[in-house]
Image (cartoon, grey):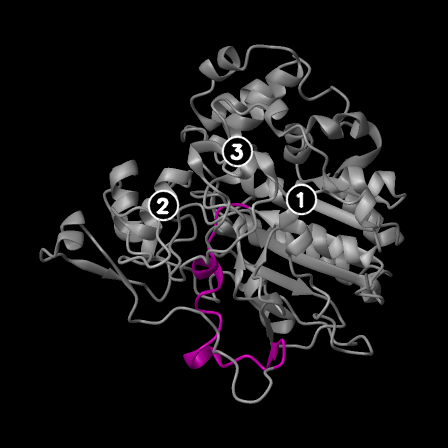
Amino acid sequence: MPQILKQIEHIIVVMLENRSFDNMCGWLYGGAQGAPKTYLPASAGGQPDPYEGLNDQLFNPVDAGYFEGKPSQTYPVFPHANATDMPNPDPKEDYPNVNYQLFGPDPPSQNPRWKNLGFVINYETVTGANIPVQIMEPFSPEQVPVISTLAKSFAVCDRWYSSVPTDTWPNRAFVHAGTSNGNVINGNPPNPFDWNVDTIFNVLESTGNSWKVYCDTTLTPSLTYSMFPKLWPYALNRFAHFDDFEADCRKGALPQYSFLEPSFVENPNDEHPPHDVLAGEQFLLDIWTAVSTSPQWNQTLLLITYDEHGGTYDHVMPPWGATPPDAKSSPGQQGFGFDRFGVRVPMVAVSPSIQEGTVFRSDSAVPYDHASIPATLRDWLNIPDSKMLPSLRVRNAPTLGQLLTLTKPRADLPTIPSPGVAKQTATLLPANSLQRSLVSADAIRQGKDPHVALSNVVTKKDAIEYFSRPHGSGTVPGPISK
């Protein structure tokens, strides 16, 4: 296989939570925001397809009578959100609810009648929200200045899809392992032994390539660590705090591959609704500051993405034709064949070797999804097939080899505006499924009954108290102990 990204020595992936492409980047270009400067791959004659952002003709119906031809009020997409902690309450993003968001009352089809028209109805139905229009309120570039400035100053992909039309654990599993082991929901309760597969970190370890997972938390274990039993042996030397990441940037001591996690529970900055996106923006600004001032900056590629859309509106129908990764996924849970992708999410690529104002799409017939991350690591590090993850999805995935078009690193650094002060998330809000999954995984890892542990976790405050108790979760090797 040809080596890619030869000028890069360090790849960093930051994965935030539960925001669609339209929700974060839909208004990035167009109108007063201007147009991209270049598209990748370069168009062979003719003009490339325009940036697939939002427009004021997009809408969702308010009630299900619309699907029966009855008169129905519709909500247009908004030019900006009314607040940076929307939507509130949290939408649903598990497999059945995502199907309704995308296909309405019809079963999934390659020729759907109601493309992406079920978001508002689903949101009101499953949450009882008094203001379901919230789901149609994306953020303007001015509201999320950090990710917007980075996207315009470097590159953004407007056709990057989550790997599965469902929630967190299955999609993060595709980033780390190229498969969710046939799972289409986090689990009830989530059990790490249902995800007991090799990860890209195991591959890097076996091939002598360096890696670390850095977490912006001092209370909970790493989510990546919690999910995969095959990572538990690497507790002490491969999992670290975010301040360790900042120190490694300063010292020029980054590993070849870094994966960064936000805080999901205490002082959350993961952007999971209804957590204020400004907290995530500040996290990105801190990452940008550390990376761009590092002596390794010219040799670094920073990738910023989201695990899945979290129930927030996106207007582009995910494509079919995805490759099932393995036998357990053909089909997997709930009869899903892993033959279509999940909803679009942002992917922003940052490097001084990337031309300003770039919009990129796959350079093959296969679209980008999260499996492109391990595929990129494979070709970048020349990992032989015999050592690589067996996932067929990864084997077929396009890589990011086309991104670095500049032969000489840029000397300019964009000025990133401060995002402002985030609202604190109320601790008495219901614990979301991800927060509960961390509790469940921690209990199972300690040999305890997850049902008992979860019976006492109703609110976010309960999850914080669970991890604050001296029961081992915060002190066992591996989470993030110093």
Can you say which quadrant of the picture contains the N terminus? bottom right
- Name the spot of residue 40 as percent of width and height, x first: 62, 75
Residue 227 figure quarter? top right
Which one is closest to the eye, mark 1 or mark 3?
Answer: 1
N-terminal of the pair, mark 2 or mark 3, is 2
Front residue of 332 and 76: 332
Residue, disc 3: 183
Q: How many marks can you see?
A: 3
Question: Disc 1 versus disc 2: distance between alpha carbons?
Answer: 25 Å
Residue 213 drawn above or below residue 461: below
Residue 39: in magenta span: yes
Residue 116: image quadrant is bottom left
Relative to the observer, which residue lies in front, 297 or 386?
386
* Extent of the magenta region: 17-42
Q: Does label 1 or label 3 sit earlier along the sequence?
A: 3
Q: Amino acid at mark 3?
A: Asn
- Identify the residue at horizontal 38%, vertical 53% (top origin): 83
Identify which residue, 434 or 279, lies in the foreground.
434
Q: Does residue 255 belong to the magenta stretch?
A: no
Tag 2: residue type? Asn
Q: Earlier in the sequence, mark 1 or mark 2?
A: 2
Q: Tell me which amino acid carries mark 1.
A: Ser
Most distant residue in the bottom direction: 45
Tell me which residue sits at (59%, 36%) in the image: 327
Label 3's element? Answer: loop
Quadrant in the rendering for residue 472: top right
Find residue 99 and name its label: 2
Label 1 vs label 2, nearer the camera: 1
Compared to 274, does 19 lie above or below? below
Cα–Cα span, label 1 and label 3: 14 Å
**Where does label 1 land, which residue?**
391
